[in-house]
Every structure is written in structure tokens, then in C-alpha cells.
Amino acid sequence: MVTIITMRKLFYSALATVVLTGCSFSFGNAEYSRTDALMGTFVQVKTVCYQGSYRDLVSIVADSFELARQLEKKLSIFNPDSEINALNDEKNKKVSDELFEVIKEAKDIGNITNGEFDITVAPILKKQGFYEDMPDKVLRGIPDNSDSVGWKNVLLYPEKKEIVLLNGAWLDLSGISKGYIVDKMSEFLQKKGVFDFLINAGGDIYCAKHKRDRDWSIGVRNPRSKLNMERTSQYVLLQLDMANMAVATSGDYENVIIENKGKKLLSHIVDPDIKKTLPEMPSSVTVIADACFKADALATGMMAIGKEKALELARSLENVEIIFVENSGAEPDLSFSGGASKYIKGK
């Protein structure tokens, strides 16, 4: 995952966000922070400047969380009554603008990554035990075979906002929905006049402006490290300074399955070509992009295609940079796309 470093303090995403729950105020500097449990993680909105009243700011941030909840209800496969599960059940459905948009973006990134990012891989994940917490009603609906895996089974009809799933295809938006919801929260805040903020959804992060033209500082975690609040130098490989950009990391930190009495680790990264999850790897890819949905989905796709192809792909995309971390030896090996250095503190 990703660690946020801001205001000269360390705020840990994913494993340690529990310490951030609740709200905080800074009356002298017009700062406000709120963290809620959403999307299976903790989501934080931190504002550092606002020209209106505190009452208005608190209300606007609260409304951004309500927007996120409404979108989660539509996009989460873990909600039996979600719109995405209605589509999965019906296979042919006119959908909301939001659901159509996120599936279209997912399909575009699937094309960019030559099918390595694929929201139809649920049967593979089910077979290998990655849906243990899913409601039985939903789990039973996921096909037991992988015949439905592949983008050819997802048809989009923009004029009617209609989506057709062929061959029993079943969609899981987990690899893009968090980033998409962060983007929608960001758009909402800016429309309401809040421009200096950061949103962190369990490591899917959007950094807007920072007051006095400062950047936000983001720490990239060593994939091999264990969380240690006392020794952060071993936990954080490098710092990124950025504004008006998003960042997301994909890697095998906690999301693995142990098989054969601990002898084999399987990652949550699926290779659609072989229709299997990949072996656990002590590596990660961090994607910096101009939209959080893009960083979120590309991080997953680029982990699947590997370092060399990921670097080549990053060179072909506008407003996308990557940092690839491999832990094959005693020290982590870092590789950067051409423009990544401008975001790295000290470079």
C-alpha cells in the first residue's frame, strides 16, 4: 500500500488507518479532517484551507462521504442489492451513468493493458479462495468455470446506457471502483469551493492543491517491510511530492492466499491469459496519474504484465508515471519511468 506523509507527521494507510478515525479541527489555520470506514477500508478527507465557514466546510465534507456511500451501494459486489450485482444477475440491463462510466473506463484500461486489467476474472478469484467474506447469495452467482472470463463477454451500448454480459460473465469492479469514487469525491469538493485537500481511500490517493503552493508528500512502502511505527525509515522507500495528481500502489502486502500448509503463496493479481492468480511476489508498482481511477486500475494491470512491459506502457501514456519495486536481493531494486523523478523528493 501507500503511506501518507503530510504536515511533517506520518499517517499510515491500510493497516493503521484505524488510528485516524473521527474528525479533527484546526481553527487557526482553517484545517479539517474526517475519516470514515468505507469500501472495506478507511477513507480520509483532509482539508488544509477553506475560505468559508467551518460549519459549511464540515457539511461539504460530510456530503462528499455521503456521495461515496451512494456510489459504493451501486458499485460494490459485496452488497447483494448493489446495481453491479443486479447487472451480474440480469446480464442485460440499462444502468446508471456512474456504473456505465466506470465499466467503460475499466474496459478502456483493459484495452491499454492488452487485457491484463480485467473485471471479468471473478470466477478465477472465487476458485482460489479470495471471496471468503462475500455474502453467500452473491458468491453462488459467480460462475464456477472460467468460460466467461474476458472482455469479449462485455458489450457496451452508450446510446442506451445498456450493458450486456455474454456467456455468463460476472463483473467485479474492486480494481477500479475505489479510485473512481475518490475522483467523484474530489470533483464534488471542488464544485463546492474546497480546493486544498487530500483524499486517501486505503492507499488510493488524490492530492489536490496544498495551501501556500506546497505539495503533499506521499511515502511509498517497501513491499517486503512489516509495519513498524518506530522505524519508518525501513518502512518507507521514498517520498513523492505532488499536487493535482493521484497515486495508487499494487503489490502483495497482505492480500495473499496460503496453500499447501504454508508452502505456496498466491497473490490477488490475476493473469487472464492463463486464468490463474500469479504466485506471490515481493514487488510492487506505484502509478502516478491525473485521475485516481486510472492510477488504481493501471497499478493492477501493470503488476500483471511485469516491470519491462509496464515501463514501456508508461512511456506511451500521457500524465502517467510509474515506480516499480522488486525485492529479489538484499536491497529493493527501484525502476522509474522517464518523468517519475520530478515527483521524487530529493531527486
Image (tube, rainbow, N blue to C red):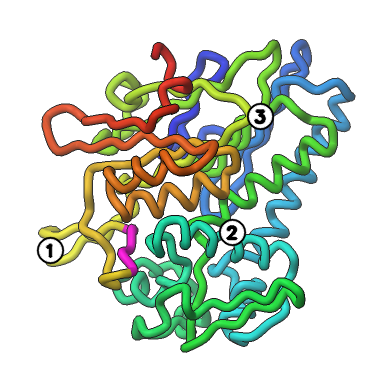
- Taking 85 as reference, is 343 above or below it? above
The CA span between labels 1 and 3 is 46 Å
Q: Label 1's element?
A: loop
The CA span between labels 1 and 2 is 39 Å
Disc on res. 261: 1
Tag nearer the camera, 2 or 3: 2
Residue at screen point 39% across, 46% down: 313
Residue 268 in picture, x, y percent from top left: 33, 59
Going by the numbered disc 1, the residue's amino acid type is Lys
Residue 133 in picture, x, y percent from top left: 44, 67
Residue at screen point 55% across, 24% down: 242
- Quarter of the image with the N terminus is top left
Whichever of labels 1 and 2 marks the residue nearer the N terminus, that label is 2
Q: Is residue 41 magenta?
A: no
Whichever of labels 2 and 3 marks the residue nearer the N terminus, that label is 2
Going by the numbered disc 3, the residue's amino acid type is Ala
Q: What residue does disc 2 label?
A: 105
Q: Nearer the viewer, residue 4 or 114?
A: 114
The magenta segment: 268-272
Q: What residue does disc 3 label?
A: 208
- Taking 72 as reference, is 199 above or below it? above
Tags 1 and 3 touching, CB below 8 Å: no
Q: Nearer the viewer, residue 32 or 106?
A: 106
Q: Is residue 271 magenta?
A: yes
Whichever of labels 1 and 3 marks the residue nearer the N terminus, that label is 3
Q: Residues within 10 Å of mark 3 (few under 14, many from 20)?
A: many
Dividing the picture into quadrants, the one containing residue 194 is: top right
